[in-house]
Image (cartoon, coloured by chain):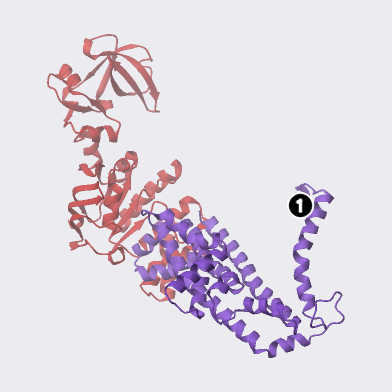
Amino acid sequence: MRSDAPRAPWGLKLAAGAGLVFMIAPLLLIFVYAFTTEERTYQWPPPGFTLQWFGVTWGRTDVWQALTLSVQVATISTAIALVLGTLCAAAVSGSKFFGREVISLLVILPIALPGIITGIALRSAFGMTDIPFSFWTIVVGHATFCVVTVYNNAVARFRRTSGSLIEASMDLGADQFQTFRYVILPNIGTALLAGGMLAFALSFDEVIVTTFTAGQQQTLPLWMLEELVRPRQRPVTNVVAVVVVLVTTIPILLAFYLTRDGDQIAGSGK
Amino acid sequence: MTTAVSLKAITRRFGEVLALDAIDLDIAEGEFFAMLGPSGSGKTTCLRVIAGFEQPSSGELSIFGQRAEGVPPYKRNVNTVFQDYALFPHLNVIDNVAYSLMLRKVPVAERYSQAEAVLDMVKLAGYGMRRPGQLSGGQRQRVALARALVNQPKVLLLDEPLGALDLKLREQMQEELKSLQKRLGITFIFVTHDQGEAMSMADRIAVFNLGKIMQVGTPEEIYLKPASRFVADFVGSSNVLPPDFVARTTGKASWASLRPEAITVTAGAGQPDLTGTVVARNYLGATTRITVDLGGQRLHAVLPSGAGVPLEGSVVTVDFDPSALHRMDDTP
């Protein structure tokens, strides 16, 4: 099969390679600086390598607080998104009603709009209604765009799931709850997992909406932003960045593989 | 004989549309019953009302003497074979078949032995571990049948069960369904738009049009004595004759149907009203079907194949016994 494919000219290969290097090299720099012995400036080449920053980072309570807050926010917004996104997808794909396309568009809007618009809009709405900025305002802000990823994944799967499956289940003696548990959930499960993981990753590194909806709280990305302007123990930021890269990449890769398998199962059923 | 399913003045509205218009129907226990009609005639809605997927807007529905309006599908002892089979793609064949047993909390070992027995009955023994996606259309159809039968329903509903199969497989499944129904003694109600299928399989047929039942009867009654022009037209093979033609040939005006095999054909011109030209000649094996044009009125006649069949373009005189004419009402 490989021999059938036309060979790319070496110029194209070089250009593609250069493009990849351009994208990946800065990421590698972050990894390198996590081990540098110089703590005030980003000096190249690093004067020496050390593992001490991992220990220092471990001992810093502000890192732990920011990390805990980010995980909490991401978990709760993802949970909200899973419930709302699934219900919305079920409604849009399961029935025809006036304004269905409009609702579909409105649900997707928060991710299409620049984050800064969502941020300002939420901030002025919270301000107008005298809602104090808190953990929950961040969660609500994140949920607006987390719903989208869950909705998009779920709606695609619902469209492929034939409506007669639900009727077949009820015909065979399952009530609504049993039908949801034994037929609907297994059929949309991987889509929800994938959507949920994407939602989690999005929420975890969100900066703009968070800036507008947070009070005194600092999520991990906000903490990093502030750390960059303060020239003290700089490599700590890099250590945290390495952790964030790992924490966000793994679920995205998992989501990618899960939906890929899901497509194969759904496709072979037709 | 016990009545399995009884509909009294069942009406179903979808907004302005009257999908079922005061349907009265009694289906006996153990009957192989066909609901025949063009698309949009209400036959599928009628089946879905019996299954419980649709609730009647008004009227009475009884299943084995028990009123069933408002009873959800999962509380009816009625199972359905869906047109698209609706097999659960995430379960393998044996779990699909055992689904209703699982819901009824039948112990695992018994669940699978029962499911295996039903799979054996539909000639799919050993296919239990496969996924629905790995089966052919005919095999999926059998799984759908097994899944609906494992519950031992009192009534089995089949929605266009053979529509997606090719001709050869369809004929084979027709025979299998028929013998399965005889063996199990379950009431089968099936929906089809194929009059040949309804004729060859059913004990009785209800012909639907525009949300109403035009006629209920045995295949023979429907064929020999269609109640209306619509039934004669839809069931197909008979000649449907307009009142003026019937008046000219027999003296009394009314719509009538005339079976092609009741017509005799002789070469040459005779009585002017019954003289015409052969415009088509279709060889069917043992018989040949010819179409005779009698000054605008076309008649089909079925003759034994052989040298006696007139050629296309030849002038012939048709004749039939007036008692073979079946008069019917004018409902289009």
Say whether residue B258 is visible: yes
> Circle 1 marks a residue in which chain?
A
The residue wearing badge 1 is A2
Asked if B203 appears above or below B118 in the picture, the reply is above
Image hue for chain B: red
Q: Nearer the viewer, residue B181 or B241?
A: B241
Is A125 positioned to the left or the right of B320 in the image? right
> A120 and A37: which one is in front?
A120
Residue A189 seen anywhere in this rendered image of the structure: no
Q: Amino acid at mark 1?
A: Arg
Q: In the figure, residue A177 lies in which quadrant?
A: bottom left
Colour for chain A in the figure: purple
| Residue A55 to residue A43: above or below | below
**Where's residue B52, x and y in %?**
28, 59
SS category of the residue bearing label 1: helix
Up the image or down, A78 lies above or below B257; here it is below
Image position of B243 (left or right of A23): left
The residue at the point 31 percent across, 55 percent down is B157
Query: In the displayed structure, does residue B251 sit left or right of residue A52?
Result: left
Q: Nearer the viewer, residue A202 or A214?
A: A214
Residue A222, quarter of picture = bottom right
